[in-house]
Amino acid sequence: MGQNIIEKLREEVINSLFTTKGFNRAWPVWKETINKLASTPTPTQLLNLGDNLRDVFYTTNTSTARTQSDVSGGGANWEGLVCWYLNLCSMGRRTVVIKHNKKLIPEPISNAITVNYGSFISNTESDLIGITFPDKVEYSIDKTMIDVVDENGNKVEIKSRGTMKYNLLEVLNALVARDFAEIEIHIIQCKTNWNDNAQIPMLWDMVYLAKTFKTGITIGRESYSINNARLFSYAFATVPTVKVEKLKPTSVAVSRVRNLSGGNYWGMKTVSGIASSMKEMLNRNLATGSEQSHTQTLADAIPKLTSDYAYFKL
């Protein structure tokens, strides 16, 4: 059987990471460390990369006098590394994590997470968006065999007549519009620095969880809202660059993200009362993409890392 639409989306997401200069430049150094940590690799080794993403990220953090451009680029690289890891561990599942990209995010999803302040349209700092698709035949068959109509009842062309390229976003738009009530949406805000940014996810999570507002604030547009999705969560994922020994369960930064709907994660092993390892996000937020465990689906996918999943460049 050919590639299904979920794996096509995953491939496009990972390929887009490697088109960015920062990620592509950092990758050879990161890969060397990743290969040491997952030398075999086994499902456990790949999952445990989540305990070591901070170490991987720091292998390219060599500057002592960083400019604002360096800080911004480092943040983008951290987003990319988290996106790469979560998709690697989700191979063969119905979950894909997308680094914000209008060409890859289905429009119903973008509309659902839109925050409207009167006539002003705003979006959260949705660095990454995890989507878990329903267990329906269209998501598992060869992507070229999908037969679906758009919201106007018109049949969606599988390939562009001009370029003959696969119409990935158009097909996804139609499927997600049809199945929106069965879709899971998980926003993951990624920041390298914890202290300076913890308040942002706390406030956005409050906005998304609020049922009513006294001012003219509404969530969603074009008839789509997170309230109509199967599940929604908002998580925080940090390196962190702050000195870890300074973080305590009573620290203000820790308290601000303690009760996020999607949880608080970092690129290290779990420390109770402070933050969970990135690998814990897979079971807590991204577990429903298969009836099998991540260990089982990874065992099936690993032999394909040099073929179907070669785009991960391991």
Image (cartoon, rainbow, N blue to C red):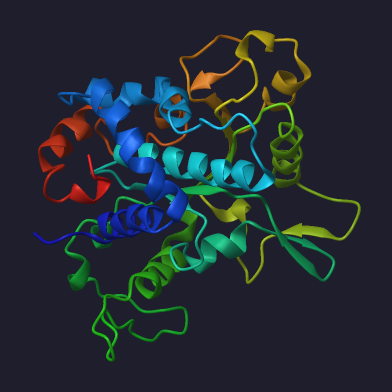
Q: Is residue 248 visible?
A: no
Give the x, y percent position of residue 236.
60, 34
Number of numbered discs visible in the structure rendering: 0
Rendering quarter of residue 173: bottom left
Give the x, y percent position of residue 40.
15, 24
Tell me: residue 45, above or below residue 159. Answer: above
At x 47%, y 19%, the residue is 268
Quarter that holds the C terminus:
top left
At x 65%, y 49%, the residue is 125
Rendering quarter of residue 287: top left
Outermost residue on the right side: it is: 214
Give the x, y percent position of residue 205.
69, 40
At x 58%, y 28%, the residue is 263
**From the viewer's perspective, is 286 left or right of 67?**
left
At x 24%, y 71%, the residue is 146
Q: Is residue 235 visible?
A: yes
**From the viewer's perspective, is 227 left or right of 145?**
right
Give the x, y percent position of residue 210.
76, 44
Quarter that holds the N terminus:
bottom left
Tell me: residue 237, above or below residue 189. Answer: above
Tell me: residue 106, above or below residue 54. Answer: below
Rendering quarter of residue 196: top right
